[in-house]
Amino acid sequence: MTVLCKICNGAVTPTVPAIKCSSCAIYFHIKCIGIDKAHFDIIKSLSGVFWKCENCRSLNNTTEAGQCNCCKLLPNLVETINKLSETVNTLQQQLLNFHSDRSNGETIIQEVNEKHKQAKNIIIFGSAEKADVSIDEQIEQDRLFIHQILEQLNLPVQPNELNVHRIGRRNLVNLSPRPIRITLKSESDVHMIVRKFQNLRNIDLYKNISMNYDKTPKQIAYYKSVKQELTDRISRGEANLKIKYINGTPKIVTLN
């Protein structure tokens, strides 16, 4: 196959010397590119010396210039990437906060609903429970016992108006009395009964009986934490402290 000069399109022969571009591998007559025979012989004799045509040199210069420009742009590119990374981290944190706020909102709504449902309940502790009666009989006895308390307090509530049941699983082997939950018609009845019940504590029949408002699990957990704080402060030597409900929330106060 005849090799042709890129410039003159003439054949490359041993008598018409030509040089090959080390980049594009195209041949050029040395006379067409202005290289004399002496320089041509020197180039051929030197190991590791390569020649590039004008187009390849121009392309190489353009590439190097582009690389230089890329090097100049690199710091800005790194800064942009860092800013984007910070933005992504911020968005991720905002997303986590959104889910957390939503979860907290749902928890608050659930707690409010539970408080609303339990606002008409009273819990009675210490009322005797018998193992030799049926569940229905025990409920009826509890209802009559509670009605007796209400009569002592001069409160007009009939037995059939009381929704009564024991809390927890019945244990026939070791029967310790389970608390009784009473559901009344209104919150005002609940507050009245709990407040007036203190007047019956000096009667022998009721000295082992205690009464309190129904509480949600979160309220119970919070009260336990306040009670533990009270115990810790007393153990450190603080005196005249007690738990007092302020606006429905248990707080540690100092006695005057």
Image (spheres, helix red, strand yellow):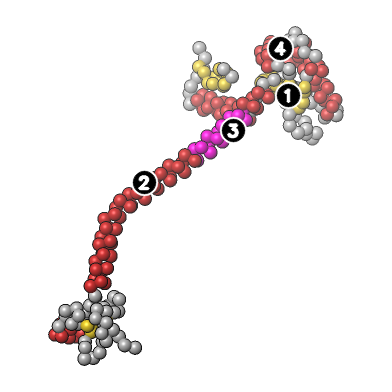
Magenta-drawn segment = 96-111
Residue 83 numbered mark, or none:
2
Horizontal arrangement in the rendering, residue 120 relative to residue 222 (left or right): right
Q: Which residue is mark 1?
A: 181
Residue name at image x 25 percent, y 85 percent: 10
Q: Name the side, left or right, on which 195 lies relative to 56.
A: right
Report crowding for label 1: few under 14, some 14 to 19, many 20 or more residues within 10 A (C-alpha): many
Measured as percent of width and height from the top left, residue 253 is found at: 52, 18
- 3D distance between C-alphas at marks 2 and 1: 60 Å
Residue that appears at 29% across and 54% down: 73
Foreground tag (2 vs 4): 2
The numbered dot on residue 79 is none
Determine which residue is flagged by label 4: 200
Please state which amino acid type lies under the numbered disc 1: Arg
In 3D space, how far apart are the residues under numbered discs 1 and 3 (Cα atoms)?
27 Å
104 in relation to 38, above or below = above
- If you read the primary sequence from the N terminus, does the residue marked by circle 2 or circle 3 appear first? 2
Name which residue lies at 26% across and 64% down. Answer: 62
Structural crowding at the residue carrying mark 3, measured as other residues with C-alpha within 10 Å and reported as few (<14), some (14–19) or many (≥20): few
User: Do the numbered discs 2 and 3 sit on residues whose CB atoms are within 8 Å?
Assistant: no
User: Badge 4: few (under 14), some or many (20 or more) residues near its Cα, within 10 Å?
Assistant: some
In the rendered image, which quarter is residue 33 located in?
bottom left
- Quadrant in the picture for residue 192: top right
> Distance from label 2 to label 3 (Cα)?
34 Å
Kind of residue at disc 3: Glu
Q: Which residue is mark 3?
A: 106
Residue 67 forms part of the magenta stretch: no
The secondary structure that dominates the magenta segment is: helix
Camera-nearest residue between 231 and 11: 11
Select label 3 or label 4 by which is in front: 3
